[in-house]
Amino acid sequence: MNPGQMRSQKKEKGRRNVAVPPNEFPEGNKESPAARQPQGPASPSDSERSRELLEWQTKFKALLNGLPDLVFVLDAEGRFLDYHTSGPGLYLSPSVFLGKRHDDVMPPELCALFAPAFQRAKKGELAEYSYPLEMPDGRRWYTARISPWMVNDEFHGVVVVIREITERKVLEEKLTAQTITDGITGLPNRVLFLDRLTQCVRRLQRAPETGAVLLLFDVDHFKFVNDAVGQSGGDHILREIGVRLRTVLRPFDTVARLGSDEFAVLVEGFADETEALRIAGRLAEAMKPPFHAGGHSLTLTGSVGILIIKPPFADPSQLLAEAELAVGKAKQQGAGSQVIFDVALHEHASRQLELERDLREALEREELEVYFQPVVELTTGKVVGVEALSRWFHPKKGEIVPAEFIPIAEESGLIYALDRLVCRQACAQLAKWLRDHPKLDNEGFWVSVNFSPRHVIQASFAEEILGILKAVNLAPHHLKIEVTESLLLGSFDQARRTLEELARKGIDSCLDDFGAGYSALGYLLNLPIRVLKMDMSFVQQVPGTSVAEGVVQTIVGLSDHLPLSIVGEGVQTMEQAHFLAKCGCRFAQGFYFGMPMPAARLEELLRNL
Ligand code: C2E
Ligand code: MG
Ligand code: MG
């Protein structure tokens, strides 16, 4: 409706047909019909009315002048009667449009917007629309608000108020771009990727034979990259990865960054596993040249999860979830792996989800049991302590072993509740045994409880443990904390502070499965570890090869130089027990001495001590 969009070539016509002759309203002025001064009064009452009218008109004029809008008045036939502007914005001479019908001066695309609004106004309704105009200085955006001009319920025409909204529109467009592209790489983000996937699925539903493949590419160990080269170096590498992935694909394939170090690729036109693996290979190849950032040269790999999109087509978020499963499996298999999604993966994930739900319920109902495995002193054969091990007897699925439910608890965050429950039950049980057998109390009989490394580095961990001991009335030196070496890879300082605090209170820490992971003796010296539990993989190889025997002797020998006790784990034979004793290993546990057992069975054992 801005005169700028009107067809300026048109000849003027019909000007005299307008309901209020335009020449009554001086052209190009900043006045509206109502803002004009009437002719001289004819009588005192007329003069009174004229004064009121004049006052009203002045207010009205001031009001209009205060608005940044462009206002047009059109009659009931849609002819331009008048206009008002208090600033720039009128790009055409009023003579080009005044008195003319809107469809004579507006271009068809604007007429298409205006005509329905005009029809609504005829019914007394308000209408609004926005539109762009190509101006000499670029594209500008406007909104037009069309309101009916009614006199005594009779439609006289419309008032069109036009306001420029270019700035708002530009901002909106910028925001929209930000919401669909990734700020670091400039690639489509998750929102846009899901949209492309949706479009792709629609196309496949119409023509399934065309096929499509979804690949998720997850950079391996990216956290360490960020640690090494800092945030901006990390961003630089992500950008570079985006460029490299792009270059090994066809221009019309989609590459997106879904978040942190995860990229997604959508390739249409085939549904063949060999071809999908070939593409995954190209992605891997693209990563081979070293990356440079922050003065470092880094070699990186990515794990790839591949999903062949087949009928019946799931919805895009389900497809993405399936590809996530495949990439998760690839990560488990090791850096640089590639895994194609299959139904077994889905079934496994469903079981995991089901177990997670059941475990949550089991924890709420405190259905997990604590078993105890005796730890013996090798020289005397006496049971000096026990290790608490959780047991889950699922009402429908039977016994579920810790190797299956502990990782689920870790991933779902249920591990905190699980460890707490086991610790509380184990400590309460031991407190009871000590009351029943005071001799054990004097001998410093202990229970060791396993904790997830994630749990130990929680700031509240020490407080939590001390709270449990207080609640069940157990002296701190009867409890030992078992943690695995993976603790050393995470927040080492936090772990050290916590374990030191517990050590000051008299609670020893044990390093579990020692030797099974990345043993770092340097770290060991900096942690208040008092017990090393030698992994059963060593124990079960002795007596045997000289290498295995040498390793076991070396580990046991650590206790000669460091304030450490060694527990040999997984002792299953008398020979193993003898070998450990001969090396000077102080403690041992394993099926040879006793299986993990319910409290009642262990109680019988204690009675005979
Ligand atoms: P772990 O702490 O190293 O516990 C020793 C594991 O070795 C136990 O397996 C035990 O049953 C098994 N074991 C003991 N003696 C022998 C033997 O002579 N031969 C063999 N082959 N195995 C033996 P379990 O109970 O299945 O627990 C596995 C792991 O799950 C534990 O290893 C521990 O890391 C974790 N876990 C168990 N309960 C808990 C818990 O309450 N919290 C946490 N965070 N982890 C737990
Ligand atoms: Mg343990
Ligand atoms: Mg162990």
Image (tube, grey):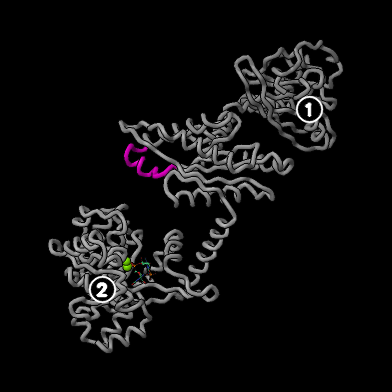
Q: Position of residue 480 (x, y in %)?
A: 26, 70
- Label 2 CB sits under 8 Å from any ligand 1 atom: no
Query: In the image shown, does 50 or 274 lie closer to the viewer?
Result: 274
The secondary element bearing badge 1 is classed as helix
- Label 1 CB sits under 8 Å from any ligand 1 atom: no
Name which residue type carries label 2: Glu
Res. 516 visible in picture: yes
Q: Residues within 10 Å of mark 1 (few under 14, many from 20)?
A: few
Q: What is the count of numbered marks? A: 2
Q: Is residue 224 magenta?
A: yes
Quadrant of the image occupied by residue 48 = top right
Q: Is residue 358 magenta?
A: no
Question: Quadrant where the C terminus lies?
Answer: bottom left
Q: Residues within 10 Å of mark 2 (few under 14, many from 20)?
A: few
Quadrant of the image occupied by residue 504 = bottom left
Quadrant of the image occupied by residue 549 = bottom left
Query: Relative to residue 10, is residue 336 drawn left or right?
Result: left
Q: Position of residue 322 (x, y in %)?
A: 57, 51
Q: Position of residue 318 (x, y in %)?
A: 60, 51
Residue 234 got which mark?
none
The magenta segment is 219-231
- Provide the residue designation for mark 1: 112
At 76% from the left and 29% from the top, the residue drawn is: 113
